[in-house]
Amino acid sequence: MLELLLLAVCAGILISGLLAVCLNNLVAAMVSSGLAGLLASVTFLLLAAPDVAMAEAAIGSGLTTFIFIYALRHAGNGEREP
Amino acid sequence: MAEGIVQVAAVLILGAILLAVTRLVLGPTLIDRVVAIDVLTIVSISLIVLYAHVSGRFVYIDVALVYGLLSFLAVLAIARFLEKGL
């Protein structure tokens, strides 16, 4: 059962990585990239590395999305100057 | 009895992950995707606690605690960004 859960979480990482590359909306791509970090943290925990999972949850999921949003706010909406 | 409860919880978590990922992929607007990632965060916390119970290592509950303390940050930042407040 837990192997099935691990497979589902890994499939979620794959799907969110693909979405982060393919989506046109920048904020939605950031959400997908944050989801990839979140599910990677769950995978680290299921593979018996709780300290790595804690660091990934703090940095990869929370701080990265916050910094991306802050940078996007200061850099405009991602549209190129003509 | 307890094994049955654990298996039912695992099936429910699996179904919740599948449904939320479906909404993340299909979601037409940004709000749908943000709500989907919030649901996935909560489901991940419950998955971590379930795994801590199954494997018998209660160190893992600390990870769930840190997760619950920090997971609202991304959703809050995106919500503030959508309201042009950040």
Image (cartoon, helix red, strand yellow):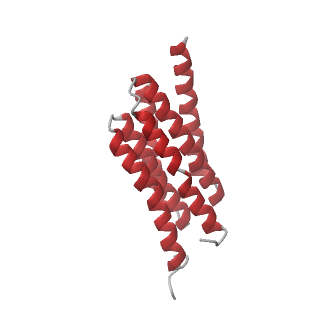
Tell me where residue A76 appears, x and y as whole percent.
Answer: 54, 79
Q: Among all residues in the image, which is located at the extreme bottom?
A: A82
Query: In which quadrant is the N terminus of chain B drawn?
Result: top right
Tell me where residue A23 appears, x and y as whole percent.
Answer: 52, 62
Query: Can I make out residue A21 in this image?
Result: no
Query: Can I make out residue B56 in this image?
Result: yes
Q: Is residue B13 above or below residue A34?
A: above
Give the camera-side residue of A34 and A51: A51
* Residue drawn at x 38%, y 44% as measured from the top left: A53
* Residue drawn at x 60%, y 51% as measured from the top left: B26
Tell me where residue A38 appears, x and y as whole percent.
Answer: 45, 48
Give the camera-side residue of B37 and A49: A49
Tell me where residue B72 appears, x and y as whole percent.
Answer: 56, 52
Total of numbered circles in the picture? 0
Query: In which quadrant is the C terminus of chain B drawn?
Result: bottom right
Give the camera-side residue of B15 and B48: B48
* Residue drawn at x 47%, y 35% as measured from the top left: B48
* Residue drawn at x 52%, y 48% as measured from the top left: B69
Q: Is residue B79 above or below residue B12?
A: below
| A52 relative position to A23: left or right | left
Q: Is residue A50 above or below residue B3?
A: below
